[in-house]
Image: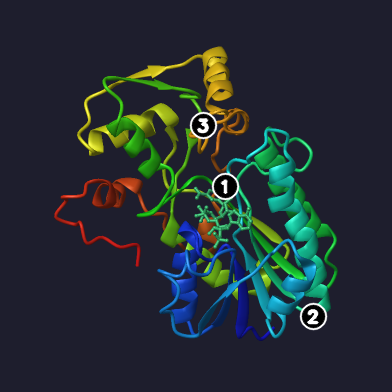
Amino acid sequence: MLIKKIAILGGTGFVGSLLCNRLSKEGFYLKILTRNREYNREDIILLPNAELIEADVNNLNNLNECLRDCDAVINLIGILNEKSNNGDGFKLVHVELIKNLIKACKKNNIRRFIQMSALNADAKNGMSFYLKTKGQAEKLLHTNTIGMKVTSFRPSVIFGKKDSFFNRFSNLLKITPLFFPLACHKTKFAPVYVLDVIEMMINTIGDPASYDKKFNICGPKIYSLKELVAYTAKTIDKKCIIIPLNNILSFIQAKIFDFLPGKPFSTDNYLSAQIDSICKQNDLKIYDIKPTPLEDIVPSYLVKDNYDSFYSDL
Ligand SMILES: NC(=O)c1ccc[n+]([C@@H]2O[C@H](COP(=O)([O-])OP(=O)(O)OC[C@H]3O[C@@H](n4cnc5c(N)ncnc54)[C@H](OP(=O)(O)O)[C@@H]3O)[C@@H](O)[C@H]2O)c1
């Protein structure tokens, strides 16, 4: 399958902007869809062979128009929280979008689709709206798309300079006086480096062996959430005492935080964290990608006056 022009949704985000950068270097022509072209232009606008297009991705006509002439679609759109608390926001962004994308791909005869999902995504048994709707999206793509070659990526938490995991905990720790109450502290994660994820995606684009596959991708080591937060505090040299909350207190904290602006933690996050985000088998090895230890990367962007402060993910 010859792929020259790729439509990218979510290409302005943390993973997406780095992926677009790499795809542009690889010589692909990119159509990057965004809700707000002016706001999201910074990292993207200077890329060679890339167009940043303002689009309403929930409008099928708009989507049809944007995908015209494309050979493949990469979808990275995803949310960790919704404005409401009833799942409608997740359904719109994760499921309804995929239904429209499938229609738009069929109309434009696009036969290659790469989907960014998440570890533990499960249409039937997903613990949270996030995991359930991510699973429903996978299911739609892998069962309702005869003729389309779909690959889904299911990463654990992803780290890198602009991640929302270590940066968020670092910011929270900085404003914490001494005690840091931590919900779901026992949940395990295997953080994976953003450039390892991107390397894997680049490898799969034209590889028929990746068609119809769902890849679980993880970093080299498993940590509890408490270990990751303690590591973050140590890295930014913040003295604090982490107070692990039991399951009931974690749930109560989530219920309260549902009402805070920006939802630093939510009931849905609490439910997602009821299951460890780790791989039984790390599929990075299929492409001989050696997962990067977080200790090699995280200090270089969390510590601003680090000698390595010019660190970039590229
Ligand atoms: N980061 C992680 O640790 C992690 C782990 C597992 C899975 N994932 C998945 O990987 C993907 C990329 O993650 P990321 O961290 O790069 O996300 P991100 O930085 O939040 O970027 C997501 C992009 O999606 C678009 N978007 C967000 N809400 C939208 C909405 N309501 N309607 C339409 N577009 C919307 C935004 O583009 P515009 O603002 O330009 O429209 C944004 O650039 C997501 O699907 C996420 O679920 C991430």
In the rendering, at what x and y percent does residue 148 appear? 78, 71
Residue type, numbered disc 2: Asn
Residue type, numbered disc 1: Gln
Image mark for residue 218: none
Q: Quadrant of the N terminus?
A: bottom right
Q: Quadrant of the C terminus?
A: bottom left
Give the Cα distance between marks 3 and 1: 29 Å
Give the Cα distance between marks 2 and 1: 34 Å
In the rendered structure, which disc, 2 or 3, sits on the residue that comes first in sequence?
Answer: 2
Q: Is residue 7 left or right of residue 193?
A: right
Q: Residues within 10 Å of mark 2 (few under 14, many from 20)?
A: some
Q: Residue at x 85, y 69 (%)?
A: 146
- Element class at badge 2: loop
Q: Which residue is mark 3?
A: 265
Q: Is residue 145 left or right of residue 245?
A: right
In the rendering, at what x and y percent does residue 211 appear? 70, 68
Q: Are marks 2 and 1 in contact (CB under 8 Å)?
A: no
Image mark for residue 281: 1
Query: Residue 170 lies in what quarter of the image?
Result: top left
Image height of 274 relative to 196, above or below: above
Front label number (3 vs 1): 3
Q: Which residue is mark 2?
A: 109
Residue type, numbered disc 3: Phe
